[in-house]
Image (spheres, grey):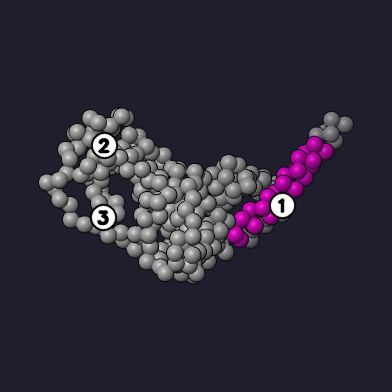
């Protein structure tokens, strides 16, 4: 009697393994099919259009009058916040000191920055008007500015960006949007309908679904990938158990 119960339990366990393996094979196949399809799309797509830079140009620069530059040490002394770095940059063809109060590992990581006029020492605030002028300086299209909006992350067109940005929209055929860091005026990037179309396929490829977890992250570093890897591991283990059982029953015969 005990042996019969043991055999029933073993059959029930093997049946569960088979059922689990079959359903996992369907899930894994669907995602592998998506990877193959999106991978093929990435190889065939127009990479220039995918970057969203059709209307992007380099901002103009001017020769700096070094004799008019203020001493950066005086800028640091007059700052109301602690300064870890000072860099001389240009915005709208004018020199500014970029003060770093808190620096992220990469430019898109959360940072605390400010701009000070290198000639006068007056701090520049990136408001709606300045953001529009900065965006226009990087834009070579024929459309005019249709709107300027301040956005906090997450930002749909720039998922990796972790700083507050100005979104400057242009009324052109490509629906171009220019994104600028709200504290430093740094150009985060251009986006348009072509880039947004490609971003949809990146979302599928990276399993970066915004309706799962805490939203999109713009890459593979998300919980969905970890969960899929775990299910794939279970799929492999159940398949291995099934193969061992078939070998034990002599289903595989080698000549």
Q: Which residues are magenta?
A: 7-34
Identify the residue position indicated by label 1 in the image. 22
The majority secondary structure of the magenta stretch comes to helix
Which of the labelled discs sits on residue 85, or is there none? 2
Q: What residue sits 54% from the left and 44% below the top?
A: 222
Q: What residue sits 45% from the left and 55% below the top?
A: 168
Asked if residue 11 lies left or right of residue 55, the reply is right
Asked if residue 21 lies left or right of residue 11, the reply is left
How crowded pointer 1 is (Cα within 10 Å; few <14, some 14-19, many 20+) is rated as some
Image location (x, y in percent) of residue 99: 29, 38
Q: Nearer the viewer, residue 214 or 255?
A: 214
User: Residue 140: which quarter of the image?
Assistant: bottom left
Q: What residue sits 24% from the left and 57% below the top?
A: 61
In the rendered image, which quarter contains the N terminus?
top right
Q: Across the whole image, how many numbered discs are drawn on residues?
A: 3
Nearest to the eye among marks 2 and 1: give it. Answer: 2
How crowded pointer 2 is (Cα within 10 Å; few <14, some 14-19, many 20+) is rated as some
Q: Is residue 208 visible?
A: yes
Tell me the CA gap for discs 1 and 3. Answer: 63 Å
Image location (x, y in percent) of residue 211: 63, 47
Image location (x, y in percent) of residue 48: 42, 67
Tell which residue pokes out farthest to the left in this image.
Answer: 67
Q: Nearer the viewer, residue 110 or 176?
A: 176
Nearest to the eye among marks 1 and 3: give it. Answer: 3
Identify the residue position indicated by label 3 in the image. 93
Image location (x, y in percent) of residue 220: 51, 48
Nearest to the eye among marks 2 and 3: give it. Answer: 3
Give whichever of discs 2 and 3 has the lower sequence position: 2
Which of the labelled discs sits on residue 125, or is there none? none
Asked if residue 46 lies left or right of residue 185, the reply is right
């Amino acid at each position: 009697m005990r042996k019969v119960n043991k055999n029933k339990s073993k059959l029930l366990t093997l049946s569960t393994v088979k059922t689990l393996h079959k359903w996992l094979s369907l899930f894994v196949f669907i995602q592998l099919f998506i990877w193959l399809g999106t991978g093929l799309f990435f190889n065939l797509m127009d990479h220039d259009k995918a970057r969203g830079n059709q209307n992007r140009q380099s901002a103009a620069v001017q020769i700096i009058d070094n004799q008019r530059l203020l001493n950066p040490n005086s800028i640091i002394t007059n700052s109301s916040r602690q300064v870890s770095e000072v860099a001389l940059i240009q915005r709208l063809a004018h020199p500014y000191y970029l003060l770093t109060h808190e620096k992220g590992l990469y430019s898109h990581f959360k940072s605390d920055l400010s701009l000070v006029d290198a000639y006068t020492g007056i701090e520049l605030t990136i408001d709606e008007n300045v953001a529009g002028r900065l965006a226009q300086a990087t834009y070579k299209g024929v459309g005019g500015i249709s709107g300027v909006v301040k956005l906090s992350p997450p930002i749909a067109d720039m998922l990796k960006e972790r700083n507050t940005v100005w979104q400057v929209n242009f009324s052109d055929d490509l629906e171009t949007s220019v994104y600028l860091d709200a504290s430093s005026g740094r150009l985060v990037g251009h986006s348009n309908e072509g880039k947004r179309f490609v971003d949809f396929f990146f979302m599928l490829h990276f399993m970066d679904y915004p309706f799962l977890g805490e939203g999109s992250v713009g890459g593979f570093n998300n919980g969905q990938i970890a969960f899929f890897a775990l299910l794939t591991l279970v799929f492999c283990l159940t398949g291995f158990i099934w193969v061992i059982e078939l070998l034990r029953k002599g289903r595989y015969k080698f000549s």
